[in-house]
């Protein structure tokens, strides 16, 4: 695909002006992570890069930034199950919908024993502005991979060349072992949150 066409698609993907909420499909399909694989943006294939994590792996050691600029280490022990909601950018309508779906779920359900983490390559400031403006449930911890893109590289969720992460859910148990992965094949779809939470509850 010509570069100008791809650039136009990405610009459209990043635009929220003309897109209504709740218009993106939730899918159960999953595709591989990491170098050698692609994610589509409508008709455009985008190459992934980085080392693909898989079921049964230990979550790799990654340092991310929280909204207060403090460090978050993925290997620090937790008494809770962790669900990593990996999104492209808070400035995209699909990610907006994905995070509102999670926020609405948390508003309506008891999810004790599970930590909900939203990871993107946005800056902590952009994440914080979004969470406040969108009134996102405060149980969701936003984590930024903007500094070194190490999360994308160490999990295989990095989209090569554009500095964004591919839409993925990763469930990690109390021993930091990966128990569930869903990477959507198409960026304009959302992953199955309900399935991820159901699996997470099995490890509480």
Image (tube, rainbow, N blue to C red):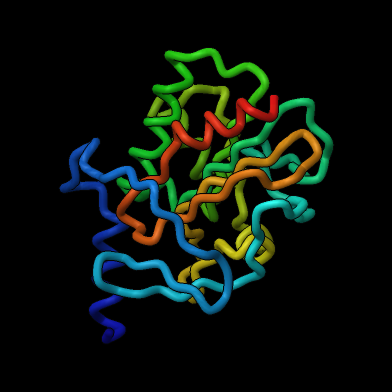
Position of residue 202 in the picture relative to residue 126 (left or right): right
Q: Is residue 179 above or below residue 185?
A: above
Residue found 47% across the figure and 35% down from its top: 195
Q: Is residue 180 above or below residue 41?
A: above
Residue found 24% across the figure and 61% down from its top: 12
Report which quarter residue 121 is drawn in.
bottom right
One can see residue 170 in this view: yes
One can see residue 62 in this view: no
Q: Quadrant of the C terminus?
A: top right
Position of residue 154 in the picture relative to residue 48 (left or right): right
Nearer-the-camera pick, 89 or 58: 58
Residue found 30% across the figure and 54% down from its top: 188
Q: Is residue 99 above or below residue 184?
A: above
| Count of numbered circles in the view | 0
> Which residue in the rendered view is the most extreme toward the right?
77
Residue 197 screen position, x and y as percent: 53, 30
Residue 201 screen position, x and y as percent: 61, 26
Position of residue 96 in the picture relative to residue 71 (left or right): left
Residue 104 screen position, x and y as percent: 39, 22
Q: Quadrant of the N terminus?
A: bottom left
Residue 154 screen position, x and y as percent: 69, 63
Q: Is residue 82 above or below residue 111?
A: below
Nearer-the-camera pick, 14 or 198: 198
Position of residue 19 in the picture relative to residue 72 (left or right): left
Residue found 27% across the figure and 86% down from its top: 2
């Amino acid at each position: 695909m010509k570069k100008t066409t791809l650039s136009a698609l990405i610009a459209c993907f990043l635009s929220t002006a003309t897109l209504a909420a709740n218009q993106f499909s939730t899918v159960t399909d999953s595709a591989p992570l990491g170098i050698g694989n692609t994610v589509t943006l409508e008709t455009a294939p985008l190459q992934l890069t980085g080392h693909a994590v898989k079921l049964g792996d230990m979550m790799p050691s990654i340092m991310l930034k929280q909204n207060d600029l403090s460090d978050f280490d993925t290997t620090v022990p937790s008494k809770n199950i962790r669900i990593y909601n990996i999104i492209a950018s808070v400035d995209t309508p699909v990610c907006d919908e994905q995070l509102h779906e999670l926020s609405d779920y948390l508003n309506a359900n008891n999810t004790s024993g599970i930590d909900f983490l939203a990871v993107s390559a946005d800056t902590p400031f952009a994440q914080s502005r979004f969470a406040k403006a969108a009134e996102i449930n405060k149980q969701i911890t936003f984590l930024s991979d903007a500094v070194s893109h190490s999360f994308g590289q160490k999990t295989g969720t990095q989209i090569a060349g554009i500095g964004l992460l591919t839409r993925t859910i990763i469930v990690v148990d109390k021993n930091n072992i990966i128990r569930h992965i869903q990477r959507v094949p198409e960026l304009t779809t959302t992953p199955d949150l309900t399935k991820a939470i159901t699996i997470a509850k099995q490890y509480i």
